[in-house]
Image (cartoon, rainbow, N blue to C red):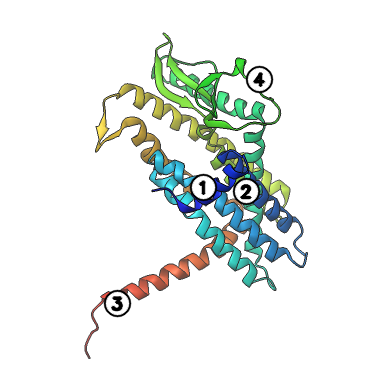
Amino acid sequence: MRDPVGVVIYSIASSLGIANITMQLIIGGIGVSILAIGFHRKESKYVPEISAIGWILVGLFFYLYSEHYVEIEDPVLILMTASALPCGIAVAFWEVSTKNDVSESLVWLKGCVVWSMIPYYAVYSIPLLNMAFVYTTALSTEIVLEFVGLGNYQSSPMRIDLYGGGDIPVSEWEGNRWILSEPLGEAGFFVPMERADGTPVSIIFILACSALQSMIIFVGAIVALSSVSWKRRLRALIISIPTIYILNVFRNVGIVWLTDTYVNWSLYGIDMFNFTHSYAAKFISLFAMFLMAIVLFDLLPELHKNVMKIMNPVVNITENMIKWFLNIFTPKLSK
């Protein structure tokens, strides 16, 4: 059974002669543009109403990814993307309900989303940048694998997953290198990994393997702190971005080595690649990001204040749900 929201959106795209991924990018682009206007023109009269539309569109943009993650059975990303639309709608109502006294933390959250999505759009939409991130990720993994003695691997020439099916070498691609003017397949630009003797390994590197998403979350969160001096923000960026990059390299090294070494390993029908990529690596990555956030909270107390204020509604709802649950299922004590 297909997601009804996706069916409606992609039906509109089909009627307009637009590829599904292009439609999704248009929705995200409009949404983040609206939020950017709201963030940089805070004093405008209609900012809350305009921003509310932006929140819903951005939530829809991420929500549309959930169908893909259901197909590849990635539970963490299914949960994160599926909750994006309800969260976007909730924040839109919050924005409108506080229009006369917009919270500083809500303004920060808006800037965080804007300055997280803009770098991602730039890298994704400029093929040269896209290919550079993918190739650097594959090459750094190859170098570390050999350096720590886990085997001799090499990166194959970069290829492109075509939208209509199949793939070709980048050298044969006739598309524009400066602006992505055509939809690509699911993998986009990718680099296959192989052993030194040319034997292929069942792993390819794509843009999602570069930890770009994790890095830009911290970029957005730090850059959006407009009340903090650029000196302090740059210090936090210098600490966080290289650390995430290095941790991601070792994550990729572990996935490649374990997948290639334990080819026949399986746990309840989950092979080694899916176990390491969709479960173990996700858990470790989220834990590492949690530790990174604690370090940044010490460097930037303003960041901690904003995060806690944004989390307050969630905490209050959770507490009320727990109280309701206890009232329903806990037997009343007789006097």
Give the answer, above or below, for where 250 lies relative to 48: above
Q: What kind of element bears circle 4? A: loop
Where is residue 253, by image quadrant?
A: top left
Q: Amino acid at mark 3?
A: Ile
Residues at marks 2 and 4, CA–CA distance in whole angstroms: 27 Å
Q: What residue is shown with label 4?
A: 174
Q: Amino acid at mark 1?
A: Leu
Residues at marks 1 and 4, CA–CA distance in whole angstroms: 29 Å
Q: What kind of element bears circle 3? A: helix
Q: Where the C terminus falls, by quadrant?
A: bottom left
Residue lying at 36% horizontally and 34% vertically, measured from the top left: 274
Q: Which mark is residue 27?
A: 2
Q: Are circles 1 and 2 on residues that touch, CB within 8 Å?
A: yes
First-in-chain label (1 vs 4): 1
Bin the neighbour count of mark 2 within 10 Å (Cα to Cα): few under 14, some 14-19, many 20 and up.
Answer: many
Q: Are circles 3 and 4 on residues that touch, CB within 8 Å?
A: no
Residue situated in front as seen by the camera: 69 or 258: 69
Q: Position of residue 49 (x, y in %)?
A: 68, 65
- State left or right for residue 266 relative to residue 252: left
Q: What residue is shown with label 3?
A: 328
Q: Amino acid at mark 2?
A: Ile
Which residue extends farthest bottom?
A: 335
Give the answer, above or below, for where 270 lies relative to 78: above
